[in-house]
Amino acid sequence: MTDRILTPDELEAALRAIGAERYHNLHPFHRALHDGKLNKGQVQAWALNRYYYQASIPAKDASLLARLPTTELRREWRRRLEDHDGTQPGTGGVARWLKLTDGLGLDRAYVESLDGLLPGTRFAVEAYVQFVRERSILEAIASSLTELFSPTIISERVAGMLSNYDFVTEETLAYFKPRLTQAPQDSAFALAYVREHARTAEQQTAVLNALRFKCNVLWSMLDALDYAYVVPGRVPPGAFRPGPQA
């Protein structure tokens, strides 16, 4: 627990310090992805496993939406559902992620079946959904604050992948462009909420721990990918195995 009550500015600084230390842009697998050091099969494995995270975000947000006490809060959080699920078939972030896996040569039905997921991916994503469903509204909102750091990582990802992989196109990476505006809007709201409502030392500690937890979720997903597809390269039974062309 924090040893004193932080001012809103101090709390924000502490949250940003967690991102600077723990955000998954620092992970070796992530650096390799951006720097063009992965082969196509390894990029496919990343996109396939990350799909489960993307597809679970609306379920996570819906569980929080159901608990929000005011029209204003529900209206704000409902926008996130629309961003990811879209307002009609073929729209929204989940659909755009499937365009990424399509562009990488993965069978869409296989991706959506989740049959090729790494166990570590499944456990990490489901832990996040459970966290948001069961913890306080304040902690659930705070766990979304990794979006504070995502615009930078998205810009790096798009530039790096376009310049380093001949099997990636701007159309393939269509998921990311809208997130450059959606993520700052989402994080601005969440940060303002946390600054206003984390008033006690106990609440502030819970908020900081929620962001640490979310960073750990994203980091552990990359740990699982690195172990299975880079070093030592031990793919668990039943998980996706890249074809010889990759």
Image (cartoon, grey):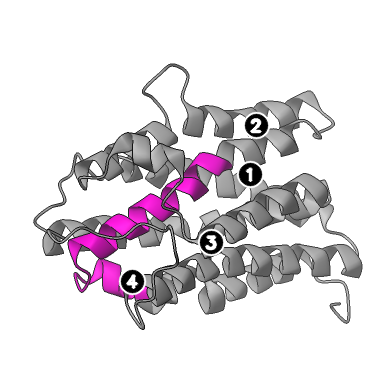
Q: Say which residue appears at 38% left-offset and 62% top-offset.
A: 153
In the figure, residue 44 lies in which quadrant?
Answer: bottom left
Say which amino acid is labelled 3: Pro
Measured in 3D between alpha carbons, the distance from the residue under mark 3 to the one under mark 2, in whole angstroms, is 33 Å
Dot 3 or dot 2, earlier in sequence: 2
For this rendering, which residue is in front, 54 or 242? 242
Q: Which residues are magenta?
A: 29-56
Above or below, comparing residue 91 to residue 163 in the picture = above
Q: Quadrant of residue 29?
A: bottom left
The disc, 2 or 1, on the residue closer to the chain's N-terminal end is 2
**Contact? badges 3 and 4 (CB < 8 Å):** no
Compared to residue 44, the image places residue 96 above or below, namely above
Tell me, yes or no, whether the two marked residues, 2 and 1, touch with CB atoms within 8 Å. yes
Magenta span dominant secondary structure: helix
Q: CA distance from mark 4 to mark 1?
A: 37 Å
Q: Is residue 238 left or right of residue 31?
A: right
Residue at mark 4: 229
How would you rate the neighbour count of disc 4 (Cα within 10 Å): few for under 14, some for 14-19, many for 20 or more? many
**x, y (%) of residue 204?**
81, 66
Q: Is residue 245 above or below residue 56?
A: below
